[in-house]
Image (cartoon, rainbow, N blue to C red):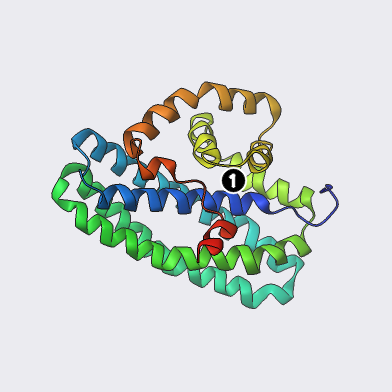
Amino acid sequence: MTTDHGPADTRSMGIVHSALRRDLERTRIVLTTEPYPDPRRRRGLAEHVLWIMRFLHIHHTGEDVGLWPLIRVKNPDAGALLDQMDADHQRIAPAITALEDAALAYRDDANARQPLLEALAGLTDVLLPHLRREELEMMPVVAATLTTAEYHDVEQEYFVRPKSFLELGAEAHWVIDGLGEDDRELIMHVVPAVPRFILLHGFARTYRRKSSLRWGHGPAAALPSLNLALLEGRS
């Protein structure tokens, strides 16, 4: 059980990372499984990749502008690890741009499927180790440095309030897709009760429709949220 004044409950970070891993892998599955996407599905998949990259850029900006500077001030001993986080973000940024360019090309031309796969591999090569390091090394430092109330304030200021209600609606269903009940309950309580109800019930149909178009009903659709415990249990 967590309290507002106890060590920060940072589980939401891992849940968001798990959604990123899940849909990057779903994208790889769709792009490598015949029959390859028809034009409508291809466009939907490309638009989703572009959306994920926008989300990732905003996510990293929130860390760079809000979370990491606060940790530097409150915990100077974390400087070396924070420098590593910054260096990771610098390496990931051009891979995000490359994947965006490849997704735009694939949206207009099915022959751009292989370059999109290559750009996807280029991103995952630098992103996935970063996500793992952040969860296993950085988040324990955050938990030891901030209270749950302080971490919640950072979440609200840098990861929730800058987004429109439409953006939060799309994001909420994307994050909870494939989550277990405990994780679902945790992540939904990042948002206050009234908007949470609207987000859950007002955007579900749109998310299901777009998700069905992207992933179909095969192995990609069945992939759960890829948390570290699941991934490392497979290895």
Q: Position of residue 215 (x, y in %)?
A: 35, 39
Which quadrant of the figure has residue 37? top left
231 sits to left or right of 138: left
Report the number of numbered marks: 1
- Quickly name the residue at label 1: 159
- 141, above or below 16, in the image: below
> Which element is circle 1 on?
helix
213 sits to left or right of 5: left
**Viewer-proximal residue among 136 and 182:** 182
Which quadrant of the figure has residue 232? bottom right
Q: Position of residue 105 (x, y in %)?
A: 20, 49
- 66, above or below 174, in the image: below
Amino acid type indicated by mark 1: Phe
Q: Position of residue 205 (x, y in %)?
A: 45, 23
- Residue pictured at 40% horizontal, 40% vertical: 221
- Residue pictured at 49% horizontal, 26% vertical: 204
136 sits to left or right of 45: right
